[in-house]
Image (spheres, rainbow, N blue to C red):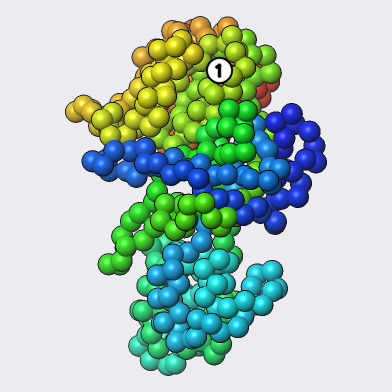
Amino acid sequence: MNDSKTASATPGASAQYSRKHPFLAELTRHDRLTRPDSLKDTRHFVVNLGDSGLTYVPGDSLGAFGRNPPGLVDDIIALLGFDPKAEVTDVKGQPSTLWEVLSRDYTLNRANRKIIGGLSERMPQGEQRNHLMEIADNFDVLSHYIDTRDYVDILQEFNEVRFEAPAAFLSQLSPIVPRLYSIASSLAAHPGEAHLCIAVVRYETHGRSKKGLASGFFADHTDMFVKNIPVYVQESRTFRLPKDPATDIIMCGPGTGVAPFRAFLEQRCLEGAPGRNWLFFGEQHRATDFLYEEELLDYQKRGKLHRLDLAFSRDQAFKIYVQHRMLENARELWDWLQGGAYFYVCGDAKRMAKDVHQALIAIAEKEGRLSREAAAEYVNVTLMKSERRYLRDVY
């Protein structure tokens, strides 16, 4: 995939910035979308692309490099016993300090497998080393061990280890990789900006509070109006609005999966697209988790969002998800598909997207009066591959 793309799909524009050479953008708006009583913390961020020349179209993603929390960096350096200002080389081969490099260049909130080998080479004989080797010698045990631990957890548990120099520790770490966020805005509606809808990841393991690298950085450690967020545009080759604006679209985006569909709606409204728009949105509770509620209801009121089907899973005794709303409206959904509508899904690949996929097959079987095999063929081959009207942005 290319790193960026203009609104007119002109190749080569914005090539100055990429994953290898991101633009330092600034945050100009930061709103909480979920209400205080929510079990989730989902936020809306506006990133100013400034004079970068970066452009995008609805369906693209913004790649963003997170930075580690200062407190986590301080704790690791203290456990290692090194000077935070010790001179080291960063991932680009440039001179820097240990504190800066740990903050900016390496993933610290999740440990990798490599560190266990690095520790074993530097561990004196004794009980700690025996315990470490028991972990290292069993693939399943090692996988489970590192799954919930960061480097503070590990250095605290194996406090007999001594790294001879900062570079020796850095050599065991994995570089920070960008997090891709579906852009929640139309560039035409918001020139020079990219809007993001981010669920902030917070959790506790081994007696310590932790956070997601990128989401925690956006929520807690990005100062407003300071150019400190490394970003680039990741083009999507397939997740696109129909070329014909008269084409109907059906969008299925529970939770933060609503992000690209906010962009779709903005773009369609701006262009005056005559095609109908249908959105399936789901979350836990309507009172606290209805993301972009005012905007979506306003689109519906103005006749721009022709159908809005909501699934708030925990507002009743039994859980209702977006796939259940699809099945409830099977006849009309099938009619839209037979009329040439595009079907989009964005969000969790492990469960939601699979359930939505099976619901589509069930709808084709029932409403199309097809055998199970023929219904699966229609969804998997005709819609997805031949006609390319079933498009997914799942993760």
Answer whether residue 142 is visible to the viewer in this image.
no
Q: Position of residue 162 (x, y in %)?
A: 47, 88
Q: Position of residue 255 (x, y in %)?
A: 40, 35
Quarter holding residue 7: top right
Q: Is residue 262 left or right of residue 340?
A: left
Q: Position of residue 386 (x, y in %)?
A: 68, 20
Position of residue 138 relative to residue 49, above or below, is: below
Answer whether residue 61 is visible to the viewer in this image.
yes
In the picture, the quarter occupied by the N terminus is top right
How dense is the environment of label 1, judged by Cα within 10 Å: few (below 14), some, or many (20 and up)? some
Residue at 40% across, 29% down: 292
Q: Is residue 334 left or right of residue 149?
A: right
Position of residue 229 relative to residue 42, above or below, is: below
Quarter holding residue 31: top left
The residue labelled by disc 1 is 269
Residue at 23% across, 28% down: 315
